[in-house]
Image (tube, helix red, strand yellow):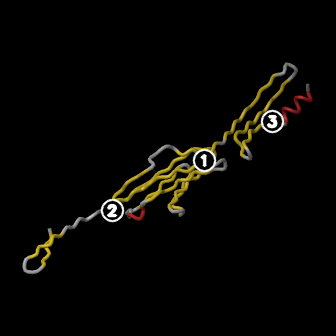
């Protein structure tokens, strides 16, 4: 019995579950065995790792030209994912767990699809958000009056 005590008392067992090359969960098991009545105490520690999961949210936004607009992306995971906003493959903003992209004085050329990428050591998830920047339109109309020569009058 003493030999069993020495093994379990000095060397904690360590279990882990693998998915491919990624560690999904770990479990630390420690036993303490005492006298011949075999009193056993243990300590379990569970560490779970999860790939990123982007929280639901708007997949489109609309703003008038010249105004500010913010796009927010949130994600959960373990370890906490890093989030990156990009537009036309150009990085725009980053954050850990949450990233907000603010466009000041939006222009019509800011319209398009913005990509939020959440990544940790387990995996990657993306979400696209479509932004429409509405420009102001001006409507002009003219009419032509022919009398003693052409003249233009603004209506």
Mark 1 is surrounded, within 10 Å at the Cα level, by few (under 14), some (14 to 19) or many (20 or more) other residues, namely some
Mark 2 is surrounded, within 10 Å at the Cα level, by few (under 14), some (14 to 19) or many (20 or more) other residues, namely some
Disc 1 versus disc 2: distance between alpha carbons?
Answer: 39 Å
**Front residue of this view, candidates 139 and 9:** 139
Label pair 1/2, CB-CB below 8 angstroms:
no
Q: With respect to residue 38, does 102 lie above or below?
A: below
Query: Which mark is first along the chain, 2 or 1?
Result: 1
Any mark on residue 37, and which? none
Q: Which residue lies furthest to the top in this view?
A: 37
In terms of secondary structure, where does tag 1 sit?
A: loop
**Front residue of this view, candidates 1 and 94:** 94
In terms of secondary structure, where does tag 2 sit?
A: loop
Q: Mark 2 points at which residue?
A: 135
In terms of secondary structure, where does tag 3 sit?
A: strand
**Where does the image place residue 154, in percent across and percent down from the top left?**
15, 71
Q: Nearer the viewer, mark 2 or mark 3?
A: 2
Q: With respect to residue 55, does 148 lie above or below?
A: below
Label pair 2/3, CB-CB below 8 angstroms:
no
Residue 130 relative to residue 52: left or right: left
Q: Mark 1 points at which residue?
A: 80
Disc 2 versus disc 3: distance between alpha carbons?
Answer: 65 Å
What is the quadrant of the C terminus in the image?
bottom left
Q: Which of marks 1 and 2 is in front?
A: 2
Residue 48 relative to residue 59: left or right: right
Q: With respect to residue 94, does 97 lie above or below?
A: above
Identify which residue is drawn at 72% across, 43% down. 23
**Where does the image place residue 37, in percent across and percent down from the top left?**
85, 19
Number of numbered tags placed on the structure image: 3
Disc 3 versus disc 1: distance between alpha carbons?
Answer: 27 Å
Query: Which mark is first along the chain, 3 or 2?
Result: 3
**Where does the image place residue 112, in percent across and percent down from the top left?**
44, 59
Q: Mark 3 points at which residue?
A: 13
């Amino acid at each position: 019995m003493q030999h069993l005590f020495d093994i379990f008392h000095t060397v904690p067992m360590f279990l882990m579950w693998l998915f491919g090359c990624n560690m999904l969960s770990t479990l630390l098991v420690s036993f303490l065995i005492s006298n011949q009545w075999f009193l056993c105490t243990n300590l379990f520690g569970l560490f779970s790792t999860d790939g990123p999961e982007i929280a639901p949210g708007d997949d489109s936004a609309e703003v008038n030209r010249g105004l500010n607009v913010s796009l927010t992306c949130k994600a959960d995971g373990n370890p906490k994912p890093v989030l990156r906003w990009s537009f036309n493959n150009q990085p725009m903003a980053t954050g850990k767990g949450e990233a907000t992209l603010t466009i000041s004085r939006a222009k019509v050329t800011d319209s398009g699809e913005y990509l939020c990428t959440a990544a940790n050591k387990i995996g990657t998830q993306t979400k696209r958000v479509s932004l429409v920047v509405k420009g102001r339109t001006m409507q002009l109309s003219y009419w032509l009056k022919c009398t003693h020569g052409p003249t233009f009058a603004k209506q």
